[in-house]
Amino acid sequence: MSLQKTDAIVIRLVDFSETSCVVTLFSRDYGKIASLAKGARRPKGPFDSALDLLTVCRIVFLHKSSDALDILTEAKMVSRFRSAATSLPHLYAAYYIAELLDALTEEGDPHEELFEAALSAITALDELADVGATVVRFELATLRILGHLPSVDFCTGCGVEVAGNGRVAFGQLSGGILCGQCREGQSHVLGVSQEVLHAIRETSSSDQVTPPLDDQVRGELRGVMNQYIAHLMGRRPRMQRFLNAAGQVG
């Protein structure tokens, strides 16, 4: 066992006892951490408000080499999500980011770039940036970093370049587009436009702000992302319906 220090985002909280809770954090240096925060539920606990959901904090934890929970010994707040009181869609989007981090990552698998992408997205949402654009940029960054980015230029079945001006088959199970031959017999296939493929290509590969999409392309892209991420997670993200109800990512 050893003490470790890092910056982290609080992505999940579960009550453990009357005085303690299990805190899941996504950290800069250690990836996802599941830790026991003893005394965190006391009115005057040792962590103050540093363990609120979406809070960015500097933590010290005792790493357990077994399957046991790590022990969180210290957490000092760096910043908190303040827009919850002014915009529910922005809060829902930030919760959605936390849900994706929890569902798509494994404990002890560090991805500093993903931490920075999450921090940037949550900060942008806290500053009331466009919800739809911020969410899809984070989704595509996450897929790229974790190796799940859909192929939008080459067939995922045979590797041939898929060219054309019309709609193209997109296989959720294969993770990208399919040529006409490989499309045959496949299930869970969507037809996607060239505009959506271009949006995925540009948004996932550029660090610059991309031009806004028109409503039709944005809606189609949202549908593709909803289904593809649900396939990767094995379920529909819980926060997705709240964002849909708010008219942000439906």
Image: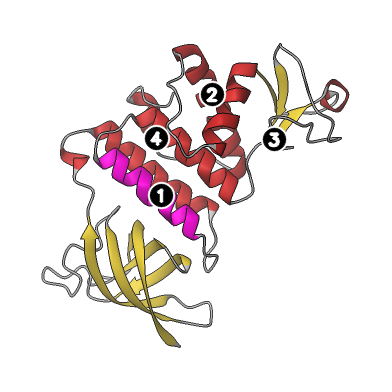
First along the sequence among labels 2 and 4 = 4
The residue drawn where x is 79% and y is 31% is: 155
Three-letter code, disc 2: Leu
Which sits in the foreground, 86 or 195? 195
The kind of secondary structure element at disc 1 is: helix
Looking at the rendering, in which quadrant would you find the C terminus? top left
Label 1, on which residue? 118
First along the sequence among labels 1 and 2 = 1
The residue drawn where x is 42% and y is 63% is: 28
Label 4, on which residue? 134
Q: Is residue 74 above or below residue 181?
A: below
In the rendered image, which quarter is residue 196 located in? top right
Three-letter code, disc 3: Ser
Residue 98 x/y as whole percent: 39, 49
Label 3, on which residue? 151
Relative to residue 7, is residue 232 drawn left or right?
Answer: right
Question: Is the C-beta separation of discs 1 and 2 under 8 Å?
Answer: no
How is this picture coloured? secondary structure
The numbered disc on residue 221 is: 2
Residue 176 x/y as whole percent: 70, 33
